[in-house]
Structures are given as C-alpha cells and as structure tokens.
C-alpha cells in the first residue's frame, strides 16, 4: 500500500540530518523509481514532476513552502488544511529508503541534480516544458527506466565523482532557468553509469532481511 511522500521524506531526513531540500526530492524520485521496479507498486501516492532543478514532488514542495495555518477561534474554518501526521513506514518501505540512502547519500547535491536530469524519466517529461514550469513524470516511465537498471546489479563505486572540474559547464549553464544537462556533464554521468549503474536489487534483498528502520 502506498504511503504519503511526507512520511518517506521524514524517514530520509531522520537518516540524513541537514539534507538540503532539493536533495530530499531527488532521493524521493529514486525511492519511487526503485520501489516501482522492485514491487510493481508506487512507494508514495503523490506525483513526481520535472522542474528546472530536477525531479520534485510538487505537492510536498508546496506544502512545506506554505506557512502554517493561523490560529483561529473554535467554530471558524481556515482555508489551510494541515497535513496529517505521516503513518509509520512498513518494513518494505523502509527497505527501499535504506537501499536508496546507501546508494545515493554519498553524492553531492550537484551530482544528484545532474544525474536525475540525465535519466530518461526526467528527460521525457522535460520535452516541451517551459522554463520554470512543471511536467508530470509518468509512473510507467519510472517503471521502465528503473526496471532495466535493477535487472543486472553491479557494485557501486567507492567514491563516485560525477562532475569533475574539467567536465563542469561554464557559468552560463548554471542559471536557474530552463536548466539542461551540459553535454560534458552528461558524458561524465554516463561514464559513471557504465562502470557502476544505479542498481538496487541486491541492496533491497539484503535490506528486507535486516532489522526494519536500521540506518544505512
């Protein structure tokens, strides 16, 4: 049964204190994709969308950006509806989070941004998307992409460095408008993917036999 993205985000933050806000959304994207590939079911209910900075769970982003509802007198209603407290994650949900943290937590925010935008789900959603706009990433795209990724597990690199100094784009490519993956960045990303793809099948299998909720 799918849970709320807020519950998955809370679990990620408990394992990675101080994690940047955009990185939470990149890891949510990987949690959703790998869980779909492993189980055939979504991990959380909300839509993942392509934004300039990469994949984002738009509902959660807006929810966390909205100020808390004002205090009102009994009998009066406010247009703000608070998010209910997230339900505890089941062992199979925790296994996915644990595997994703083990695989991706060592990547910098920049590396995660470049990696997510080099992958097929974000690129497909980005076709025709206006700068600053949002486009839905279909679950079927995630399933197709991560099912292939999980099919032939390989070992992870000890210290992946997706973007070297020589491969970094010039300053104009760093703007926050319609951000595209620079060709040099994409080359480095795919070199890393070729040597150690983002595959989680063994980690999920191990995690599901470990104590639920243990940190990666």
Image (cartoon, rainbow, N blue to C red):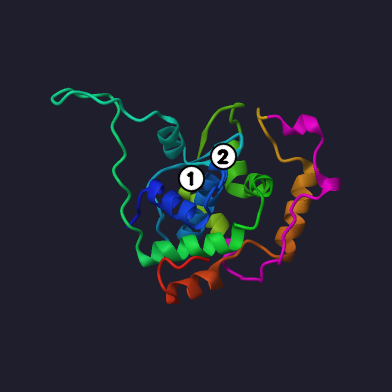
Q: Residue furthest left?
A: 75
Please tell me which residue lies in front, 191 or 98: 98
Where does the image place residue 57, in percent across and percent down from the top left? 47, 41
Quarter of the image containing the N terminus? bottom left
Residue 8 vertical position relative to residue 169 in the rendered view, above or below: below
Where does the image place residue 42, in percent across and percent down from the top left? 41, 54
Numbered badge on residue 125: 2
Numbered badge on residue 138: 1
First to last magenta residue range: 147-175
Q: Residue at image x 35%, y 63%?
A: 90
Q: Residue furthest right?
A: 166
Q: Is residue 80 left or right of residue 185?
A: left
Query: Is 14 inside the magenta-drawn segment?
Result: no
Q: Is residue 44 left or right of residue 144?
A: left
Residue 148 vertical position relative to residue 127 in the rendered view, above or below: below
**Dot 2: few (<14), some (14–19), or many (≥20) neighbours within 10 Å?**
some
Q: CA distance from mark 1 to mark 2?
A: 8 Å
**Dot 1: few (<14), some (14–19), or many (≥20) neighbours within 10 Å?**
some
Q: Residue 177 lies in what quarter of the image?
A: top right
Where does the image place residue 178, in percent across and percent down from the top left? 66, 30
Q: Residue at image x 39%, y 46%?
A: 6
Mark 1 and mark 2 lie on one chain; the one further toward the N terminus is 2
Query: SS class of the residue under badge 2?
Result: helix
Where does the image place residue 52, in percent across and percent down from the top left? 61, 34
Residue 2 vertical position relative to residue 22 in the rendered view, above or below: below
Query: Is 158 inside the magenta-drawn segment?
Result: yes
Numbered badge on residue 88: none
Residue 39 seen from this side: no
Which SS type dominates the magenta stretch? loop
Tags 1 and 2 touching, CB below 8 Å: yes
């Amino acid at each position: 049964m799918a849970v709320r993205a807020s519950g998955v985000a809370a679990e990620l933050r408990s394992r990675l204190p101080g994690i940047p806000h955009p990185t939470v959304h990149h890891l949510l994207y990987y949690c959703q994709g790998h869980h779909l590939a492993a189980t055939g079911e979504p991990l959380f209910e909300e839509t993942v969308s392509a934004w300039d900075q990469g994949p984002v769970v738009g509902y959660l982003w807006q929810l966390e950006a909205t100020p808390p509802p004002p205090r009102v007198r009994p009998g009066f209603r406010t247009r703000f509806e608070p998010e209910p407290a997230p339900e505890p994650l089941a062992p199979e949900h925790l296994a996915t989070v644990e595997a994703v943290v083990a695989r991706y937590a060592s990547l910098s925010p920049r590396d995660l941004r470049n990696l997510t935008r080099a992958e097929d789900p974000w690129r497909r959603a980005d076709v025709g998307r206006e700068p600053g706009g949002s486009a839905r990433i279909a679950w079927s795209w995630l399933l197709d992409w991560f099912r292939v990724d999980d099919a032939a597990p390989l070992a992870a690199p000890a210290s992946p460095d997706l973007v070297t100094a020589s491969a970094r784009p010039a300053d104009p490519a760093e703007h926050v408008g319609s951000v595209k993956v620079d060709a040099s960045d994409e080359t480095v990303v795919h070199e890393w993917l070729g040597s150690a793809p983002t595959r989680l099948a063994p980690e999920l299998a191990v995690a599901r036999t470990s104590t639920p909720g243990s940190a990666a």
